[in-house]
Every structure is written in C-alpha cells, then in structure tokens.
Amino acid sequence: MKLSEYPLLFGGQELLLNNQRAIYWPQENALILSDLHLGKAAYFRKYGIALPATVSERDLFRLQQLLVHYHPELIIIVGDLIHAGANKEVESFRNLTLQFPNTCFSLIKGNHDKYDPKKLSELGIAHCYDLLQLQNIHFSHSLIHSEIPTISGHIHPGVRIRMPDRKFLKFPCFALTGNLLILPAFSLFTGLDTCSLPEDTVCYAIHEEGIFTV
C-alpha cells in the first residue's frame, strides 16, 4: 500500500487526507472513513451477479494497513459500514477489530446500517451514533449544510476531469463545500457521484500516487 497525505485545515483542526480514502486527525489520534459497504459483493453474488470475493478483502486489507500505520485510538466510520445483512465478508470485519483491541471503533449510522446495536457490538463496534460531535466538528452520514463544520459521507463523491486527448477520467475525491467535508467511499466497489456537488466545491481527487486539487 502506497500512502500519500494532503494536509487540510478544517474547523480549526489539522486533518491529513490520504490517497487510501481516509482522514487521519492527529489531535484526536483518530482515523476517519465512510461507506465500507461490507458484504456488498457477497450480496450481489447471492443474486447471481458474479463478483470476486477479493473485493471486500482488499478493502479490509487497506484498513488494516492504515491501522498499523497510524495506531489510532479511535476509528470513526461515518456510515454504511454494512451493505445488507450478515455474511462471510461482514464476519471478516470482526476478525480485524479483534486484532486491534486498543482501538475504539465507532459508527455513525448510515442508511444501510440496519444491524441491531447488539450485533454491531459483537462485530467490535463500541459506540453507535446518529450524530457525533468532537471538538467543534460534527459527523453525520447524510449531508448537512450548517454553520458548524461537518464531515459526512453517503454520496460517494467523484470528479470528472478532461484529459489532453479529450477523453474524461473519473476520480474519487474528498469534496469541500462551505462547512461541509464529504468523504469518498472507502470501498473500492462503489460508483462515483460526479453530478451532485455545488459549483464552488473544492475537490481533492485521489489517485494511486497521491491527491491533487480540482
């Protein structure tokens, strides 16, 4: 895993965006990410759509590598941890949380998070919130336009860039619009929304080698 960081001052706090689709918050020793959609590939396979089991494994491996690199005390998952129901891919997440007993895994509930809190606890989720505030930053899965700095997920933001050959490429991105910072989907198996962002949005596009602004 090649890790590249991009510093961003947000809500008076220094955040480190990285090209693995997550944020490290040094002051809180927290790792922030959204939209893992665990079990999505297995859900599709259940209905006859052939997808490799390695889709979810790659996401969890990247998360494991980030945990090893940063040693965070806290992980904030800003919604949509689990796509739909229990399956083998979801159980793999439990194996990961067991490897990091000194890290507190917290979930901001998303529209896909229908699990019972007891079952989430069994997977290693210590806390589950509808809305969380740390320092002066709010965390909400859905987009909230507020005077309070807010980090959200949900829409899987992406940016479409025209190349010199007149073709277009799409990149996942962190999207900053006003006091709202929208996280890219952590899962590699997601579509990209390149149409919903306001015109004044600053996009921090992600590619394998790093992050660039658009």
Image (spheres, rainbow, N blue to C red):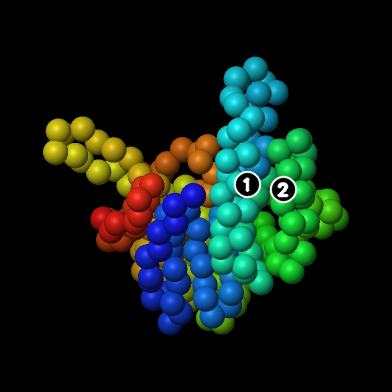
Cα distance in 3D space between marks 1 and 2? 7 Å
What's the residue at 32%, 47% (across, down)? 159
Q: Do the residues labelled 1 and 2 touch (CB within 8 Å)?
A: yes
Of mark 1 and mark 2, the one earlier in the sequence is 1
Quadrant (top left, top right, bottom left, bottom right) of the C terminus: bottom left
Query: Would you name the residue on which mark 1 appears?
Result: 60
Q: Residue 170: x, y in percent?
A: 33, 40
Which numbered circle lies on residue 93?
A: 2
Position above or below: 69 against 157? below
Does dot 1 land on a helix, a strand or a loop? helix
Q: Where is residue 87 in the image (x, y as percent from the top left)?
A: 76, 35
Tell me if I can see residue 142 in this picture: no
For the point 58% across and 35% down, the residue is: 55
Residue at 76% from the left image edge and 49% from the top image edge = 95
Left or right of 91? Residue 136 is left
Measuring 60% from the left and 20% from the top, which residue is drawn there?
A: 49
Give x and y (percent) for residue 146.
46, 71
Tell me the element at label 2: helix
